[in-house]
Amino acid sequence: LFASLGVSYLAIVFSESLGGDQSQSSSGLGLLPDTLTSSLPYLTSLPSALLCLVFLATEFRWALPDSGGNAKALESESTIDSSSLLCAGNILALLYVTGAYFAKVHPTLSLNEMKLDLWPLQNGVNIALATTVTRALSPFLLRTPSPSSVTQSSYSGNKSIRTVALALIGLTLFDAISTFGTVANAAVDATESSMSVMETVARAKLASPSSQNTPLAFLWQPGLLEIILGHDSSKVTEALGLGDIVFPSLLVAWGFAADHVDALSRSDEDDAEKVDPSPSKLSSHPYATATIIGYIFGSFATEIVGSFRLLGNISGLPALVFLVPSMLAAVSMTAWSRNEVADVWDSTGEDDGV
């Protein structure tokens, strides 16, 4: 990721320096910088395309059997075979990413009388990015104990939500300040744009080739989940930032971890009492379900506030302001109904660290 950002930054700086130099001759050597200048906007998107390919290939190899990403393949092979680069997961990921970039220019593919929308391919790449990032961040915020290392006295500490909640609250405050703070400054200074920083970045990614005649308008920029209603239309109807999915998904991951701890606790109790565990108890996920329900209610709240302009004339709302409180409220209500508020919020001070 650092290398990709560095290459993109150097390419942009180099492009601007070449574009500002008007003393180039019309000879063959003088045409070379102009050619580089016209192609650099496309080269800057190459690192992003490679990142999308790597993240999507990771998920495809994990989901598909015999693609080098499942546990059996990792255990059986200590070294990476060069032929694994041509596995089904990598090939499908390459075709998928190619289709996602092609959908920016042609969102609908006509096959005889049938029209096939290609823009959902872009959402698939974004979901793969979100899933892989969540897999990478979850171990730093969650502690899922193994069945052999769990004791009865350690269950409550392992269910603490404080670390995840504090991280999400901080991100929510940053999102709110970045949005409402910029709009408030624009209201004071009429020379500034009334759009927030977040909205400006989102609108740049949503630019269509028909609205802007620039090279970047023809390139898909990942980072937004989009919905386009109607065939042969490149105008995005709805959009949701990728961070509004990645960060709440950490809370969903905590919900599954907490439910896993409860399942281990019930299993130990049933073993001690020599009672067969109930399938309904083993398959229940109260905390994970609560986080998903809270996310749905937060999404409805975002749409209602935005549609009726309840917070003023702000077109781009910070979704985390509605998603995170609703999810935390749903978790708190579930913990209260199960008499586990002290365990979830670790109000007893027994958390032994993350």
Image (tube, helix red, strand yellow):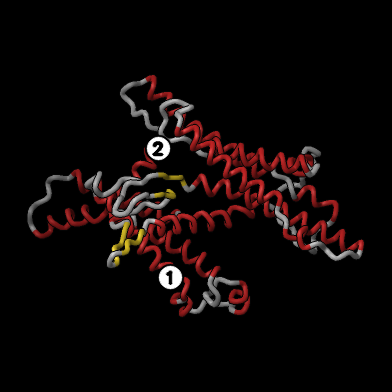
Which image quarter is the N terminus in? bottom left
Q: Residue at x 42, y 35 (%)?
A: 316
Q: Is residue 177 above or below residue 253?
A: above
The answer to whether mark 1 and mark 2 are in CB contact below 8 A is no
Residue that label 1 marks: 92
Specify whether 150 is left or right of 272.
Answer: left
Q: Residue at x 31, y 23 (%)?
A: 191
Mark before the other along the chain sequence, 1 or 2: 1
- State the image coordinates of residue 353 (x, y, percent, origin top left): 73, 47
Q: Amino acid at mark 2?
A: Glu
Question: Farthest residue toward the front?
Answer: 113
- Where disc 2 sits, the SS reads helix
Apparent side of residue 133 relative to residue 26 in the rendered image (left or right): right
Q: Is residue 44 visible?
A: no
Relative to 272, say whether 134 is above or below.
Answer: above
Q: Is residue 306 visible?
A: yes
The front one of 57 and 252 is 252
Would you call the spot at circle 2 few (<14 residues within 10 Å), some (14-19), or many (20 or more)?
some
Question: Where is residue 206 shown, x and y percent of the image?
Answer: 35, 46
Q: Which label number is shown at residue 199?
A: 2
Q: Position of residue 6 (x, y in %)?
A: 39, 52
